[in-house]
Image (cartoon, rainbow, N blue to C red):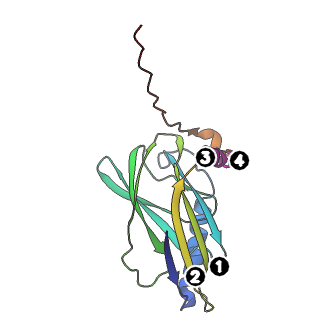
């Protein structure tokens, strides 16, 4: 597990981070209608505990590959789930992720954490990623700093069902289908008689 510590020195980065948090949280709240722009949905579950007095100060950038194309998507921890609707249908590999402080004036080179994960997106279907973000943000010192710990864990079947049940409450849910992973089962070898 990795820990990041930051101290707030100027109010401008804090205001900027509140603004960005509002944009990300409002964009992640609803399912869009299927369209030319929104062909697929990827849902990333997260568990976020925040005991600091600040909104989330870190966003996670996932580095992905699909058919030779490199790309990325961002997730802002919210103790719920993020909805990513900007990816095309296809097979994807998440090679790793980086963590980015919001409102940081001079960004440093971020460490890439490896994450070998494959998933498939199909047209007009919702895919729930089988890994979740588990994060904690807490006060760091008396001057207004904070620290951020984060890890990824497997999503259980019950957690996946919980996410789907929350998505069912959205008015656009009926316009989508849930992607079902193919479970490959080996057939037993015939026993000679």
Helix, strand or loop at label 1? It is loop
Q: Earlier in the sequence, mark 2 or mark 1?
A: 1
The answer to which of 19 and 74 lies nearer the viewer is 74
Q: Is residue 51 shown above or below 172?
A: below
| Residue labelled with disc 2 | 146
Q: Is residue 163 toward the left or the right of residue 5 in the image?
A: right
- Secondary structure mostly taken by the magenta-highlighted segment of the chain: helix
| Residue labelled with disc 3 | 160
* Span shown in magenta: 156-167
How many neighbours does mark 4 have within 10 angstroms: few (below 14), some (14-19), or many (20 or more)?
few
| Residue labelled with disc 4 | 169
Please tell me whether mark 2 or mark 4 is closer to you in this view.
2
Q: CA distance from mark 1 to mark 4?
A: 30 Å
Task: Indicate the position of residue 130 as horizontal and vertical percent values.
Answer: 52, 48
Quarter holding the C terminus? top left
Say which residue appears at 60% left-offset and 43% top-offset.
157
How many neighbours does mark 3 have within 10 angstroms: few (below 14), some (14-19), or many (20 or more)?
some
Say which residue appears at 44% left-offset and 21% top-offset.
188
> In the rendered structure, are the residues bearing label 1 and label 4 in contact, judged by CB atoms less than 8 Å apart?
no
Helix, strand or loop at label 3? It is helix
Q: CA distance from mark 2 to mark 1?
A: 7 Å
Helix, strand or loop at label 4? It is loop
Q: Is residue 2 shown above or below 94?
A: below
Q: Earlier in the sequence, mark 1 or mark 3?
A: 1
* 162 in magenta: yes
Q: Is residue 13 toward the left or the right of residue 51 in the image?
A: left
| Residue labelled with disc 1 | 52
Question: In the image, which disc is placed on residue 89?
Answer: none
Q: CA distance from mark 1 to mark 3?
A: 28 Å
Q: Is residue 85 shown above or below 137?
A: above
């Amino acid at each position: 597990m990795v820990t990041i510590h930051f101290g707030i020195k100027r109010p401008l980065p804090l205001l900027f981070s509140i603004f960005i948090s509002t944009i990300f949280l409002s964009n992640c709240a609803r399912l869009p209608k299927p369209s030319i722009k929104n062909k697929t949905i990827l849902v990333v579950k997260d568990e976020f505990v925040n005991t600091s007095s600040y909104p989330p100060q870190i966003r996670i950038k996932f580095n992905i590959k699909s058919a030779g194309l490199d790309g990325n998507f961002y997730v802002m921890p919210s103790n719920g789930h993020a909805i990513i609707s900007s990816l095309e249908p296809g097979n994807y590999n998440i090679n790793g992720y980086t963590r980015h402080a919001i409102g940081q004036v001079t960004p440093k080179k971020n460490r890439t954490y490896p994450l070998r994960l494959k998933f498939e997106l199909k047209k007009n279907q919702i895919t729930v990623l089988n890994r979740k973000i588990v994060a904690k943000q807490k006060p760091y010192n008396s001057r207004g700093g904070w620290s951020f710990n984060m890890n990824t864990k497997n999503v259980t079947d019950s957690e996946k069902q919980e996410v789907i049940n929350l998505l069912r409450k959205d008015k656009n849910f009926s316009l989508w289908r849930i992607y079902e992973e193919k479970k490959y089962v080996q057939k037993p070898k015939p026993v000679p008689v």
